[in-house]
Image (tube, rainbow, N blue to C red):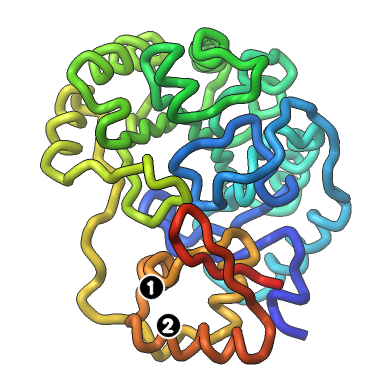
Amino acid sequence: MTEREKYKYIFGPVPSRRLGKSLGVDIVPLKTCTQNCLYCQLGVNGVTTVERKPYVDMAEVVAELKDKLRSDVEIDVITVSGSGEPTLNSQISELISEIKAISDIPVVVITNGTLLSDQQVRKDLAQADVVMPSLDAGDEETFKRINCPHITLTLEKLVEGLIKFRKEYSGKIWLEVFFCEGINTSDEQVEKIKAKVLQIDPDKIQINTAVRPAADTMAVAVSPQKLTIIAEEFGSNAEVIASFSKPSKPDDENIDTETIADMLKRRPCTMDGICLSLNISESRATELVSQMLEAAIIETENKAGKLFYKLK
């Protein structure tokens, strides 16, 4: 049995610039989210909802985690994230408690933060070591344009939830701000976002942009120079996390079709996305993808003029 067949809810560990070797835990169905962001690597079509429910069998999730943790593999963090908004799962608190009971590995939750206006959601994340929410807009119009939120969500609710969470939560908050050229990069927008970030008072501000291919062509990357200037505007606890350069030596020898399949299980990718995410040459990626297409393991899908590969 392959790794992909063995584990339905966990993936990795994968190298993360921010977190080290991260073991991912996915607790909502693919592209089930409170938003439909322009820059989402999962594509532009998905289920946008604010309904909290179990979604998956948490006993199976915990069983997979226990099995993986018994293996001889180095893990720096266990990250609750994956293919949608994890706080939509009403059992996320139980999952974090279970992880804490079986391991001393830090728990990180990557969330868009939209449900933190709900007191129960804030309580559910209380045991996490690090929470990484997002804030990409300084006004309602831009929030709707870049994040395409569920109709019940507003920027005001998002910011209020983040402020309340900061007051109640004793762990670390690393706030990501994702910039798309021409949408939220004007001096006025940066100042508006900065004012709200100051209210939230996160431990870190992580500045990002669309380095990896996004499904929507409106998600245009901001230059490294401009991102650096923006980060300086946010102060000493801000850092640019977007990685523009590829490692000098591709890791072709350690990548096979199973590695690509494990990544595509979480999100469809373009050829560029596969090369960048796995640090492999285009020739090696093309060779492996061709094998997978021939074996009917994957299929192609055209989104906004870009060719994406996804598992069948």
Q: Where, quadrant-wise, is the C terminus in this rendering?
A: bottom right
Residue for point 81% across, 36% down: 91
Specify the label residue 75 is tagged with: none
Q: Quadrant of residue 136?
A: top left
Residue for point 67% across, 74% down: 71
Residue nearer the viewer, 151 or 26:
151
Give me the C-alpha separation between circle 1 and circle 2. 6 Å
Q: From the top left corner, tell me how far across and down residue 255 is, in percent.
A: 47, 84
Mark 1 — residue?
275
Q: Is residue 100 above or below residue 185?
A: below
Q: From the top left corner, tell me how far across and down residue 39 is, in percent.
A: 44, 43
Specify the label residue 285 is tagged with: 2
Q: Secondary structure at mark 2?
A: helix
Q: Assess whether mark 2 and mark 1 are in contact (beta carbons under 8 angstroms).
A: yes
Crowd band around label 1 with a 10 angstrom C-alpha radius: few (<14), some (14–19), many (20+): many
Residue 60 relative to residue 142: left or right: right
Task: Tell me which numbered mark, 1 or 2, is placed earlier along the sequence.
Answer: 1
Q: From the top left corner, tell me how far across and down residue 108 is, in percent.
A: 55, 42
Q: Quadrant of residue 4?
A: bottom right
Type of amino acid at the residue the image marks with label 1 = Cys
Q: Is residue 20 above or below residue 101?
A: below
Residue 276 relative to residue 233: left or right: right
Type of amino acid at the residue the image marks with label 2 = Ala
